[in-house]
Amino acid sequence: MPPKNEPLNSFDWMVVEPSLNEQFTLERSIREIEDCESLEVLSRLCVAMARQNWHQGKLLKQAVGHIALMDAVFSGAEQKP
């Protein structure tokens, strides 16, 4: 339940703020990819990332839909006398 002073339609929870450690980990991965000279390895990586991106996009869409449904039910329950 959001704090009393926070509006129910706030989308602040969607803001992504990576920690310093997460930023370093991402940068290390990016540099490993940039330094890779094997086209075969890069090709396999691209295929894996395309599959993972599709799956995560689908999962995210389903999750946001589920959250929206729960929010609608929750908002409706709070408005009843």
Image (spheres, rainbow, N blue to C red):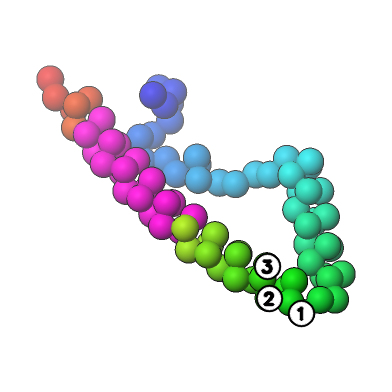
Asked if residue 13 lies in the magenta stretch, the reply is: no
Assess disc 1: are there few (<14), some (14-19) or many (≥20) residues with their C-alpha within 10 Å of its C-alpha: few
Amino acid carrying mark 3 in the image? Leu
C-alpha separation, residue under disc 3 versus residue under disc 2? 5 Å
| Residue at position x 60%, y 46% in the image | 16
Circle 2/circle 1 CB separation < 8 Å: yes
Circle 3/circle 2 CB separation < 8 Å: yes
Label 2: state its secondary structure.
Answer: helix
Is residue 65 found left or right of 35 in the rendered image?
left
**Segment tinted magenta in the rendering:** 56-74
The residue lying toward the viewer, choosing from 58 and 17, is 58
Quarter containing the N terminus:
top left
Amino acid carrying mark 2 in the image? Ser
Dot 2 corresponds to which residue?
43
Dot 1 corresponds to which residue?
39
Above or below, comparing residue 14 to residue 31 in the picture: above
Dot 3 corresponds to which residue?
45
**Quadrant position of residue 19:** top right
**Quadrant position of residue 8:** top left
